Image (cartoon, rainbow, N blue to C red):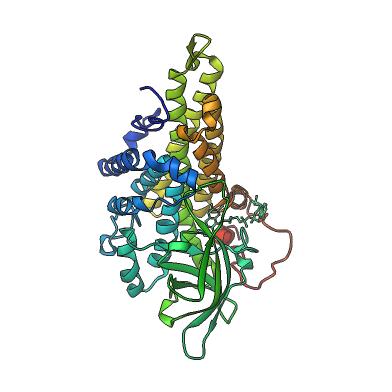
Amino acid sequence: MTITPETAGRGIEPTDFVGVDRLLSDEEREVRDRVRAFVDERVIPVAADYWDRAEFPFELLPGLGELGIMGGTFAPEYGCAGMTNVAYGLAIAELARGSGSLSTFMHVQSGLAMTAIHELGSEEQKQKWLPPMARCEKVGCFGLTEPGAGSDPGAMTTTARRHPDGGYVIDGEKRWIGNASFSDVAVIWARTDDGKISGFLVEGNNPGFRADVLPRKGSQRSAWQTHITLEGCRIPEENRLPGASGLGSTLSILTHSRYGVGWDGLGQASDCYEVALAYAKEREQFGQPIASFQLVQQKLVEMVTEISLSQLLAAHVGRLKDDGALDPATVSMFKMNNVAKARRTSALARDVLGGNGVLLDYRVMEHMADIEGVYSYEGTNDVNTLIVGQAITGLKAFSSAPPKSPEPEKDGRAQRVEERAE
Ligand SMILES: Cc1cc2nc3c(=O)[nH]c(=O)nc-3n(C[C@H](O)[C@H](O)[C@H](O)COP(=O)(O)OP(=O)(O)OC[C@H]3O[C@@H](n4cnc5c(N)ncnc54)[C@H](O)[C@@H]3O)c2cc1C
């Protein structure tokens, strides 16, 4: 095919050098192909424009809901598809291939907010929120990070004090919270009167809740992250997540979402490679296609090799998750590897495209910028490295200082690894 700004990234056969397709079931292929068609027809034609204007593509939400991928593995009784974790991952990878901003929306909506309600919520909370969120008719967000508490969420200062008339009053600030400016429900993490961290559902029309979009963002520009201010934010007793007790209870939520983010890197890397390969075959310099030059082939081979290894890891990790045998440290290795390899792949692809590589029309530049955000969220590359380091040495290298808080799950993202190591 001829590669132009109009065709870049569309209608290209999925990269499958080592035959990973053989590891998939018919149902998983069907989910992948369904999302791929949606991305080719609806997402790629508009993604660069939305990214350029830093606007969220609200027009895509109904179609995204109809795809039936939100809350992927959760049961049909909650309006979800009950698909395998591999199918869910394939859906994320395809979405990320089209737009890292849209896959980031999905991580927040499905991987974080819906998962928190599904894993920690009451039956009433699940019935109220999960079906409309699965259809993207309602939107959720997940407020963990604070201005002073990023990699160390145990340092959070947001409080949820009991009100004498019942319920709670939440005060504090949250930073980097995706979707919050248009959320119907926010999962907010805060310290209760006993100093323990718990989770609460704050509905979007609460007068004590404000979410301001972070301006001038250079990554995932068409996903909106916000600074949340909670001031005397009153919520009823029934909006507490009954299953949330201590920061450690966020671990399974973060692990689930982090699993999805590993597939995100794969989708973005694949698109970068596929665009670069098509471009290199088409573009001529010195009277021949640039794909015929050894140095260009070396870059393409490095890309497809890393993508193949990332695919194999993704499929294996997904099967472990389906079997209930997935360790959080393995998820950290998966996210760390696939996103770091996507970062390298996007840089190589951008190089292969020469000057055109910095134009948004060819998509690679958008991926390259978007991967920077992914590299830092769901545990930075460093934090995931330290989780794996702790798993293999039994030694925790997060901090040399004694814990500031008596709460045992100081770093919730590493707690289960610590427990196992000790
Ligand atoms: C695009 C985007 C979307 C996001 N969406 C959400 C969201 O929806 N909800 C939410 O709650 N949060 C969200 N986040 C926040 C994200 O989880 C944090 O950015 C992340 O946890 C890192 O925290 P920080 O930015 O404060 O960096 P810091 O923790 O300040 O880290 C800065 C640097 O120090 C390094 N570092 C930190 N601690 C250690 C250590 N012990 N050893 C070695 N190195 C260390 C880090 O690896 C990093 O390189 C989002 C972030 C981004 C960029």
Q: At which x and y percent is residue 262?
A: 47, 46
Residue 23 vertical placement versus 160 (above, below)? above
How many numbered callouts?
Answer: 0
Q: At which x and y percent is residue 377?
A: 55, 52
Residue at the extreme front of the image, as rendered: 53
Residue 135 vertical placement versus 205 (above, below)? above
Report whether residue 315 is seen.
no
The quadrant of the image that shows the N terminus is top left
| Residue at image point 45% right, 23% down | 279
Which residue is nearer to you in this view: 341 or 209? 209
Report whether residue 390 is seen.
yes
Ligand 1 position by quadrant: bottom right
The quadrant of the image that shows the C terminus is bottom right
Query: Along the horizontal axis of the image, is 223 left or right of 216?
Result: left
| Residue at image point 41% right, 49% down | 320
Residue at the extreme top of the image, as rendered: 287
| Residue at image point 40% right, 50% down | 57
Residue at the extreme right of the image, as rendered: 401
The quarter of the picture where residue 414 lies is bottom right
Which residue is nearer to you in this view: 46 or 31? 46
Which residue is nearer to you in this view: 382 or 360? 360
Residue at the extreme bottom of the image, as rendered: 164
Residue 307 vertical placement versus 282 (above, below)? below
Query: Along the horizontal axis of the image, is 25 left or right of 355?
Result: left
Q: At which x and y percent is residue 243?
A: 44, 72
Q: At which x and y percent is residue 40?
A: 34, 38
